[in-house]
Image (cartoon, grey):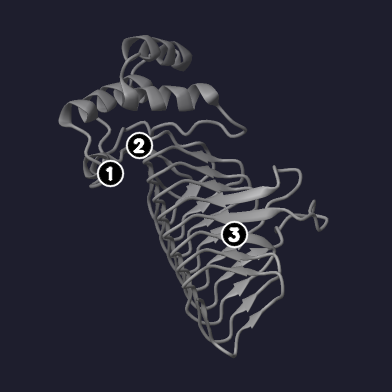
């Protein structure tokens, strides 16, 4: 059974999972579902139609399920759904969705949100994503699996961040970032690939070499960009990693695609050539 500190208030209608632990001075609203084995350490605020997956740990002064910071919101019963085994540190905030944006904000499994990070309305965050301190998403942002956001990264609304990308600290992300890309800068540009991330996820040297070749062709070669995309789509038709980059580009979105800087610079986490 759940262990609930007597100083906390659990509204009628809230669903508290088996072996959950709710520490001092927490507030849990009537439409909240807390999964088995979740831990609210102290001073946690859960409201709205919010579901938290099993074994997620939530630290003091976190506020989840509050209304969207959107002038279009009119009190609709939209939702926030957070996956299992997440670690949500102090002062993190996440909002429910808007009716116009699909009605739901989602966060995957095994995500790590450091102090002061924020997930806005209608965002969709994948699995195993890390937000460093004060990293924030605007509304309607999509973040793929295994993405790392450095400290104080700010992502513009409607931006797409591809799987395995890394966003360097204190960067402003206003354009879509390809899968496995490494973006950095106040007005961020691609400075290479998240090669270390690819290695850590067990991809072979040959697989990484092919991604590097594709990157050079896409962003550093001459000619029309659309022609380079078409050429790669044929040349790497059976390559799963390059295929993800091509599919991401072809899908497009409301924001333009982030391009590489003219110098094709590298950094300790990424490599363009």
Task: Give the residue pinned by disc 1.
Answer: 197
Residue drawn where x is 70% and y is 59% of the image: 69
- Mark 3 to mark 2 CA distance (whole Å): 30 Å
Residue drawn where x is 33% and y is 18% of the image: 221
Q: Which element is circle 3 on?
A: strand
| Disc 1 + disc 2, Cβ < 8 Å | yes
- In the depicted structure, whether residue 157 falls above or below residue 33: above
Neighbourhood count class around disc 2 (C-alpha, 10 Å): few under 14, some 14–19, many 20 upward = many
Q: Choose the circle earlier in sequence order: 3 or 2.
A: 3
Task: Give the residue pinned by disc 2.
Answer: 180
Task: Tell us which disc is closer to us: 1 or 3.
Answer: 3
| Disc 1 + disc 3, Cβ < 8 Å | no
Q: Choose the circle earlier in sequence order: 1 or 2.
A: 2
Horizontal relation, residue 152 to residue 204: left or right: right
Residue 40 rendering spot, x and y as whole percentages = 50, 75
Task: Tell us which disc is closer to us: 3 or 2.
Answer: 3
């Amino acid at each position: 059974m759940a262990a609930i500190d007597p100083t906390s208030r659990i509204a009628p209608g809230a669903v508290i999972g088996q072996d959950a632990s709710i520490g001092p001075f927490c507030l849990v609203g009537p439409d909240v579902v807390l999964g088995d084995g979740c831990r609210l350490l102290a001073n946690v605020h859960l409201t709205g139609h919010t579901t938290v997956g099993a074994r997620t740990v939530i630290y003091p002064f976190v506020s989840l399920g509050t209304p969207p910071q959107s002038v279009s919101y009119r009190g609709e019963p939209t939702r926030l759904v957070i996956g299992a085994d997440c670690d949500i540190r102090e002062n993190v905030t996440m909002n429910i969705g808007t009716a116009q944006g699909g009605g739901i904000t989602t966060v995957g499994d095994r995500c790590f949100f450091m102090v002061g990070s924020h997930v806005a309305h209608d965002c969709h965050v994948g699995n195993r994503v890390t937000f460093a301190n004060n990293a924030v998403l605007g509304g309607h942002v999509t973040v793929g699996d295994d993405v790392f956001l450095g400290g104080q990264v700010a992502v513009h609304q409607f931006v797409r961040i591809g799987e395995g990308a890394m966003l360097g600290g204190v960067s402003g992300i206003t354009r879509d970032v390809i899968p496995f890309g490494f973006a950095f800068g106040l007005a961020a540009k691609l400075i290479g690939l998240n090669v270390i991330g690819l290695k850590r996820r067990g991809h072979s040297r040959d697989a990484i070499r092919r991604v590097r070749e594709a990157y050079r062709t896409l962003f550093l070669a001459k000619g029309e960009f659309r022609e380079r995309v078409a050429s790669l789509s044929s040349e790497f038709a059976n390559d799963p990693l390059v295929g993800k980059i091509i599919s991401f580009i072809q899908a497009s979105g409301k924001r333009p695609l982030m391009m590489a800087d003219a110098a094709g610079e590298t950094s300790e986490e990424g490599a363009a050539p």
